[in-house]
Image (spheres, rainbow, N blue to C red):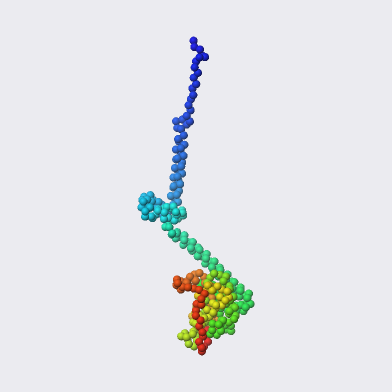
Amino acid sequence: MSDDSTRPIVIKRKKVVAGGAHGGAWKIAYADFVTAMMAFFLLMWLLGSTAKGDLQGIAEFFQNPLKVAREGGSGSGDASSVLKGGGKDLTRQSGQVKRGEVDTEKKTYFAKETNAEFRRKEQESLENLKSQIEKMITETPQLAQFKKQMLLDITSEGLRIQIVDEQNRPMFDSSSAELKPYTRDILRQIGRALNSVPNRVSLAGHTDAAQFAGGDRGFSNWELSANRANSSRRELINGGMDESKVLRVVGQSSTILFDKNDPLNSVNRRISIVVLNRKAETAILQEEGPEAEVGGEEALPGFQLPNGAKTAG
């Protein structure tokens, strides 16, 4: 008879394996799959945002990388971006742009916008100068009495200031480039005002159609008009105008009459001061040539009226 108290006690321990037969490897595989899908969609987005020319450069690089690396060309880093075969402007519809070049279409557009804005501001500046000079003439007692002799208007070249003769009140001594005292005051006041804008100026002297005794073969209206323009230049500078602002000083004799119906009218004797806009200034410089030098030196030699010459101009 067996004794239960002597029967051995058996303890069974069950080994539990987490995840059973699958384990945790599926999680790693799933993470790899998700990462790969993210990379794929990112690649598709980049390719969809890249210009056609850049795509061709990338394709050429992978088709023949050694040739591209040796010889350069599309895909070798000559795009507008530091990234090979790429470009920083994702909206650009054209292909790659070589280093040193720019997007011509955008450059033209912005250049037009910039030029239009500059012309608008320049026009406003000249209009303000015109108003400033008109106000100065009205408020200055020494100038107010000569108001009818000073004509201001805006032309295609810029702001034109014309100082004309009156029958009983000429600007110069007869047949001379010697300025009347009141003409000096007018020019000095204007010269001071011209410093308020950066534009350069052109001066022209004009006479009426009356001729000297010797005609054009001797001292003529050409010399007289040139001398008068140069005398006006000196007075503008004496009034405080920067001498570097003078771009051109010319004498035009009676070729451009103010009153075409009466060539002998005193109003044809005048000094024309044009505050040049950028377009007119550029045209004058190009006309003179690339080596033309413009400075404050006297642009025209002085002439003396020969003895016995009759009055003219």
The residue drawn where x is 49% and y is 79% is: 300
> 228 or 132, which lies in front?
228
The one nearer the camera, 20 or 164, is 20
Q: Residue at x 58, y 74 (%)?
A: 240
Q: Position of residue 141 (x, y in %)?
A: 63, 77
Q: Is residue 96 visible?
A: no
How far across and how far down the image is residue 8, in percent?
49, 17
Residue 7: percent from left, percent from top: 50, 15
Taking 74 as reference, is 165 left or right? Answer: right
In this rendering, would 52 be left or right of 306?
left
Q: Is residue 129 above or below residue 84?
A: below
Residue 304, percent from left and from top: 51, 84
Residue that lies at the very extreme toward the front in this rendered image: 297
User: Is residue 128 visible in the rendered structure shown here?
Assistant: yes
Is 66 rendered above or below residue 196? above
In the depicted structure, whether residue 25 falls above or below residue 212: above
Q: Residue at position x 38%, y 49% from top?
A: 62
Question: How many numbered marks does the figure carry?
Answer: 0
Measuring 50% from the left and 14% from the top, which residue is drawn there? 6
Q: Farthest residue toward the bottom?
A: 308
Q: Where on the picture, by quarter, is residue 71?
A: bottom left
